[in-house]
Image: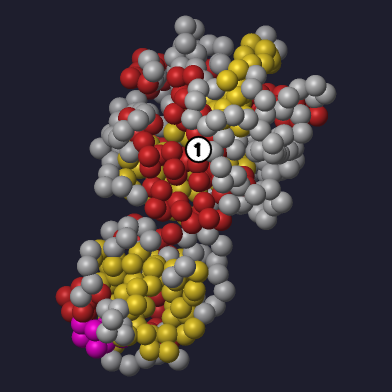
């Protein structure tokens, strides 16, 4: 990034309206795994404790928010008793000119949901400091976060500390941050890697470097596509460079931070963020399955990659369109789009119908052993081109009164349609069911 670009970031990178308001773990798992801890179902009250830590001569005052005893819904209570249980850690990094309290909409929900949240006050970029963004580009803030993670994990065995015995030190840790804090978060996956990280959510970040093979984390990007401060294209580049599992939640027509605060897609932001962490750190598969619905609104678009485990084989079926009585074909051995244009059944017209539970199904083509995908969240025709099943490859089976079935794509809640009476490729874009959205399932 050019010095001019950095200077522009130094001028604009901040909270906007929001401003008012020695490794302990080994390598983290790439995906959520089976674990003895169950994700909490209740909402917790929030406690907060402050720790006067440092890294060399860098003071790292850190406020740790945590699940506490008491009635949920109030403000954090200083030194409140810790709730019963063992909880994963998710560190949060504030933006330029901010502090942990100014980011309450992203910090408090984590603690309420059953996470311990260390939130450092960075020494040169917090409220009332000079705003030295070079501390992000030279790695100081990413290394500060690693120090805070180490110190927090050590509390689990610190005699007399109220958090002792309440910290999950086996699953890895989560990290998140917005703006300059999002860049700090991305730096922990790239130029200043911390292999303890199992989940990350950078909000409104820019690309901080090439991914490190030392880190294997589930990464969710959240960004407004009209962000004037942190370029959307840079975040998309950062996303493209990382391996799956990953996702990108785009708030269309949105700037730098509106989606964080109450109103404007705040609900989608928080629900997706929390369930990403619940899946990644608690192994909560129900939270994983909620992700597409969490992220859906009239002004959001989400890219998902490898967020579900490939299921086993199911019944062999062909789909015959009620619009023209022709079978759906995976054109060119699955390399082309799906079209209902074949009078007979061969390998290109056969699919494994895989039951994912609760009425959800996936289709795997016999032409190439790839899963049918609602390309670009249903905006483009269906193609059998995916090696694993995620929300784009998941469809809800609807049993119609006439004996036919319809398929509703999970990514956009639209029905698969044989457009033009079957003369055009199948696409998940219909809001209601008619002949073009109705198929006979022919087995065998």
Q: x, y percentage for residue 172?
A: 67, 41
Does residue 406 lie above or below 151 as drawn? below
Q: x, y percentage for residue 139?
A: 58, 23
Question: What is the magenta range?
Answer: 321-327
Does the stretch in magenta take in 335?
A: no
Task: Decide which of 23, 127 is in the foreground and name it.
Answer: 127
Q: x, y percentage for residue 391?
A: 43, 59
Residue 215 lies left or right of residue 340; in this view the side is: right
Tell me which corner region of the image, top left, top right, bottom left or bottom right, holds residue 427: bottom left
Q: Is residue 44 visible?
A: yes
From this viewpoint, which residue is outermost toward the front? 71
Quadrant for the C terminus, please.
bottom left
Q: How many marks?
A: 1
Tell me which corner region of the image, top left, top right, bottom left or bottom right, holds residue 92: top right
Task: Name the residue rendered at 66%, 38% in the picture.
Answer: 87
Which residue lies under the disc numbered 1?
A: 201
């Amino acid at each position: 990034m050019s010095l001019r670009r950095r200077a522009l970031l130094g001028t604009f990178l901040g909270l906007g309206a929001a401003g008012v308001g020695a490794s302990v773990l080994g390598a983290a798992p790439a995906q959520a795994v089976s674990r003895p801890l169950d994700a909490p179902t209740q909402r917790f009250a929030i406690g907060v404790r402050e720790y006067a830590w440092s890294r060399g001569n860098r003071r790292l005052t850190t406020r740790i928010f945590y699940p506490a005893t008491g009635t949920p819904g109030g403000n954090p209570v200083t030194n409140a008793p810790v709730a019963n249980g063992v909880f994963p850690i998710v560190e949060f990094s504030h933006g330029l000119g901010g502090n942990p309290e100014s980011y309450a909409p992203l910090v408090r929900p984590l603690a309420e949901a059953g996470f311990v949240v260390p939130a450092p006050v960075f020494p040169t970029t917090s409220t009332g400091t000079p705003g030295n963004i070079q501390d992000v580009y030279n790695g100081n803030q990413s290394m500060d976060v690693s120090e805070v993670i180490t110190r927090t994990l050590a509390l689990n065995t610190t005699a007399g500390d109220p958090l002792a015995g309440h910290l999950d030190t086996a699953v890895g840790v989560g990290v998140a941050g917005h703006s300059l804090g999002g860049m700090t978060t991305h730096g922990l996956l790239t130029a200043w890697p911390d292999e303890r990280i199992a989940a990350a959510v950078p909000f409104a970040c820019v690309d901080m470097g090439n991914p490190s093979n030392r880190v294997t984390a589930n990464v969710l990007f959240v960004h407004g596509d009209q962000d004037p401060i942190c370029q959307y294209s840079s975040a998309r580049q950062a996303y493209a460079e990382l391996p799956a599992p990953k996702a990108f939640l785009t708030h269309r027509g949105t700037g730098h931070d509106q989606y964080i605060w109450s109103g404007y897609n705040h609900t989608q932001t928080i629900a997706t963020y929390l369930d990403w962490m619940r899946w990644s750190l608690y192994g909560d598969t129900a939270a994983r399955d909620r992700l597409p619905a969490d992220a859906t609104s009239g002004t959001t678009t989400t890219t998902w990659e490898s967020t579900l485990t490939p299921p086993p084989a199911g019944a062999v079926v062909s789909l015959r369109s009620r619009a023209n009585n022709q079978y759906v074909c995976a054109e060119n051995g699955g390399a082309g789009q799906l079209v209902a244009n074949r009078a007979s059944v061969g390998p290109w017209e056969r699919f494994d119908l895989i039951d994912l539970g609760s009425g959800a199904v996936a289709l795997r083509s016999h032409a190439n052993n790839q899963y049918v995908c609602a390309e670009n969240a249903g905006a483009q025709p269906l193609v059998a081109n995916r090696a694993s099943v995620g929300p784009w490859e998941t469809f809800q089976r609807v049993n119609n009164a006439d004996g036919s079935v319809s398929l509703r794509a999970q990514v956009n809640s639209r029905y698969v349609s044989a457009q033009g009476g079957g003369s055009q490729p199948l696409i998940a874009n219909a809001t209601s069911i008619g002949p073009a959205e109705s198929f006979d399932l022919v087995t065998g």
